[in-house]
Image (cartoon, coloured by chain):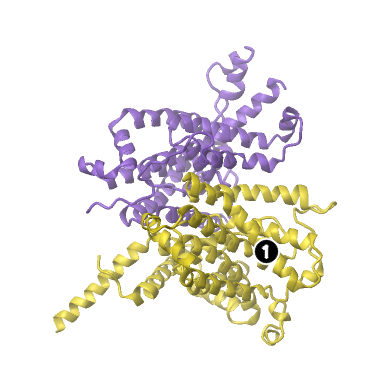
Chain colours: A purple, B yellow
């Protein structure tokens, strides 16, 4: 086992962890405000389709990302109106939006391009391309650290670095700003926030909208960075893995990053069963690696690895008049 | 908020929700440059205007009755079981094992054995989320989602590495022995006068109907059903009345998982006659829409299941004969869940206002 094998896997780990991370942080905002969101998957999918289509028409990955955010925001708005304004069941709304996204993306892509629900392959500036960080080539020969910098950290796409910056930003917003304090409060005890004269609906709507923006970015990353175009059901359950990571991290941003890196690592390993076999000395079925994030999350939920306690007011619509 | 008359609550609310979903679907069809009227014509002709179409509509409806009842039972206990898909896949495994490894002398015995296998495997897959909800307080929605994915991986593993016959490429079990063939509608005396070509609808349709009656009797005519409903309405009240919450959560989820698993006797034993990958093909999720539309009543579930059977068969016809992709089904499914499940309150508020308008008009007239 040498670095020649490990570093490419770690590189893939970061590439795979990024969409999970964006979606996971997205979910964190919504759920911390007391709105459960199992519709991360759907919003990512919509984002991916919008990004793929607009990036193809304009040749710009950036415009694609903007479109992804816009598309995902529409779905976030529906989720907000349903579960905040009309006090509907947040979980059912999430399920509904996932189906809506799954169907609509194929319908629209088929209408626009007629390629069986795909968008045409993207190339050049229509994709986010790998960036070589400063000094990466110069440090390449430095053993371990330099090579790690060159092979793993450098050469990712801009959205990867953005995702990790967003983690830091989220930590700061959540724990060091007035908005963050109120956001956490509204997810635990909305009545107290209301008494303090702050709008519960306003806070929850802003949280749900932030969720929309970040899910859009996650979708854009899928269609214009990780892959070259949108394909039917291309998110393949990543929205749910992100949800699992969020629970695994007990709704905290830094821990969410570790959880997503871990789950991204499993996904990267699933591509290299030969490496896994050589390490553990027996054949590990690939489906087992695919299922590991879910199994670990169930173990966390079962309370074997610490207890995962969701925001107390999560899932319950707030009724002002009492 | 004023209350609606009972008939409006039972019939009008779902009808308006459905109408809203239909109107939006029509707008979607217009938006992609197609003709909604043509679409509905193709759907009706392909699924309701001949015996062949009905054979498919009722075949899909059979699966949806099982999964719809599964969601219904859990709903009455205040639990949202999204795990029907995984439970139905595991049910398929139960059916496959029962059919492949036990030499049944006759299809009727095989059906009983396979049904037991399906229900036990489905219930077992619901048992762990149920236990975690009951004992550890982990949210059933999250655990059942996780179990859907774990089920997917487990089934891939079972089909690729364990059950696939040697030398075969596709991930599926061997075909079941011919003695296990369940009579289709075209092979049942009497019914074959109507169904003159081979259709997938089979005897399990009647089992589904029986199960609907059983679920109704269980929920509204037994002590256990009363306890389940009481627990679903108010957990503290039920607890105060001496109802054991752990017991109710476990029993309700085991019944729910068992019903979802039972679906496999229709699609795995009745149609494919071997276990294929992704055998439930979304029927577990459609159960959510069916239960919501059917207002969590077995009669409503049966009607909603037939409606979704029509949507499924009609949608397939759309994919064949028009330029509208088959995925329109998923859009309609999402809209139905959205309006009947999540925007219930909006529809109600709307209707309450309309009723109030009528009432005040009548007052003025007097």
- Tell me which corner region of the image, top left, top right, bottom left or bottom right, holds residue B97: bottom right
Residue A91 position in % (x across, y down): 44, 53
Residue B88 position in % (x across, y down): 62, 59
Residue A129 position in % (x across, y down): 56, 32
Q: Is residue B307 above or below residue B333?
A: below
Q: Residue furthest front?
A: B242
Count of marks placed on residues: 1
Q: Say whether residue A53 is visible.
A: no
Crowd band around label 1 with a 10 angstrom C-alpha radius: few (<14), some (14–19), many (20+): many
Residue B149 position in % (x across, y down): 60, 48
Q: In the image, what residue occupies the spot 64% across and 34% down?
A: A268
Left or right of B353 in this view: A307 = right
Q: Residue furthest top?
A: A142
Q: Say whether residue B264 is visible.
A: yes
Left or right of B114 in this view: B254 = left
For mark 1, what is the residue?
B116
Along the line of sight, the residue nearer the viewer: B345 or A219: B345
Q: Chain of mark 1?
A: B
- Tell me which corner region of the image, top left, top right, bottom left or bottom right, holds residue B119: bottom right
Q: Is residue A220 above or below residue B222?
A: above
Q: In the image, what residue occupies the spot 46% across and 71% down?
A: B220
SS at mark 1 in the image: helix
- Quadrant containing the N terminus of chain A is top right
Q: In the image, what residue occupies the spot 66% across and 34% down?
A: A269
């Amino acid at each position: 086992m040498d670095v020649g094998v490990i570093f490419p896997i770690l590189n893939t780990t970061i590439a795979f962890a990024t969409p999970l991370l964006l979606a996971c942080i997205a979910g964190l905002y919504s759920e911390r405000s007391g709105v459960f969101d199992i519709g991360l998957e759907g919003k990512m999918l919509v984002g991916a389709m919008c990004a793929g289509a607009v990036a193809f028409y304009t040749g710009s990955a950036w415009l694609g990302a903007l479109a992804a955010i816009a598309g995902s925001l529409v779905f976030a708005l529906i989720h907000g109106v349903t579960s905040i304004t009309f006090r509907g069941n947040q979980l059912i709304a999430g399920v509904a939006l996932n189906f809506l996204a799954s169907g609509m993306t194929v319908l629209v892509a088929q209408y626009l391009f007629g390629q069986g629900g795909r968008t045409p392959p993207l190339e050049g500036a229509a994709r986010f391309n790998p960036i070589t960080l400063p000094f990466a080539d110069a440090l390449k020969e430095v053993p371990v650290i330099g090579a790690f910098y060159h092979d793993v950290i450098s050469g990712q796409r801009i959205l990867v670095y953005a995702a990790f910056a967003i983690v830091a930003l989220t930590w700061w917003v959540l724990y060091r700003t007035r908005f963050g304090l109120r956001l956490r409060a509204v997810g635990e005890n909305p009545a107290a926030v209301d008494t303090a004269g702050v709008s519960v609906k306003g806070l929850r709507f802003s949280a749900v909208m932030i969720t929309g923006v970040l899910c859009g970015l996650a979708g854009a990353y899928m269609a214009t960075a990780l892959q070259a175009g949108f394909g039917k059901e291309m998110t393949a359950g990543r929205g749910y893995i992100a949800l699992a990571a969020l629970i695994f991290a007990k709704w905290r941003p830094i821990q969410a990053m570790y959880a997503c890196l871990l789950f991204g690592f499993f996904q990267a390993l699933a591509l290299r069963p030969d490496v896994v076999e050589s390490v553990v000395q027996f054949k590990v079925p690939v489906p087992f690696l695919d299922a590991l994030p879910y199994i670990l999350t169930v173990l966390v939920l079962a309370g074997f690895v610490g207890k995962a306690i969701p925001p107390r007011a999560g899932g319950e619509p707030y009724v002002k008049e009492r | 908020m004023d209350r609606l008359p009972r008939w409006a609550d039972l019939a009008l609310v779902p009808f308006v929700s459905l109408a809203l979903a239909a109107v939006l679907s029509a707008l979607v069809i217009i938006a992609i440059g197609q003709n909604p009227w043509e679409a509905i014509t193709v759907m009706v002709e392909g699924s309701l205007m001949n015996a062949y179409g009905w054979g498919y509509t009722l075949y899909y409806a059979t699966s949806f009755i099982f999964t719809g009842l599964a969601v219904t039972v859990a709903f009455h206990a205040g639990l949202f079981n999204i795990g029907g898909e995984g439970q139905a896949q595991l049910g398929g495994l139960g059916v496959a094992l029962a059919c492949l490894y036990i030499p049944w002398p006759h299809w009727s015995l095989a059906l009983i054995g396979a049904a037991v296998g399906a229900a036990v495997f489905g219930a077992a897959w619901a048992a762990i989320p149920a236990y975690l909800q009951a004992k550890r307080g982990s949210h059933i929605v999250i655990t059942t989602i996780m179990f859907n994915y774990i089920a997917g991986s487990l089934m891939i593993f079972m089909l690729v590495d364990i059950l696939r016959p040697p030398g075969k490429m596709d991930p599926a079990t061997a075909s079941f022995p011919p003695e296990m063939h369940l009579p289709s509608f075209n092979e049942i005396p009497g019914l074959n006068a109507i169904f003159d070509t081979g259709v997938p609808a089979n005897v399990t349709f009647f089992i589904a109907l029986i199960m609907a009656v059983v679920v109704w009797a269980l929920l509204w005519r037994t002590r256990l059903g009363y306890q389940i409903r009481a627990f679903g309405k108010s957990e503290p009240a039920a607890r105060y009345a001496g109802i054991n919450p752990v017991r109710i959560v476990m029993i309700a989820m085991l019944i729910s998982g068992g019903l979802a698993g039972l679906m496999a006797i229709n699609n795995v034993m009745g149609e494919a006659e071997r276990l294929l990958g992704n055998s439930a093909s979304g029927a577990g999720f459609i159960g959510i829409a069916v239960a919501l539309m059917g207002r969590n009543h077995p009669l409503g579930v049966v009607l909603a299941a037939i409606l979704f059977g029509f949507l499924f068969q009609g949608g397939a016809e759309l994919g064949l004969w028009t330029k509208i992709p088959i995925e329109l089904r998923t859009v309609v499914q999402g809209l139905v869940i959205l309006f009947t499940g999540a925007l219930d309150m909006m529809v109600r508020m709307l209707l309450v206002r309309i009723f109030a308008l009528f009432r005040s008009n009548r007052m003025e007239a007097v």
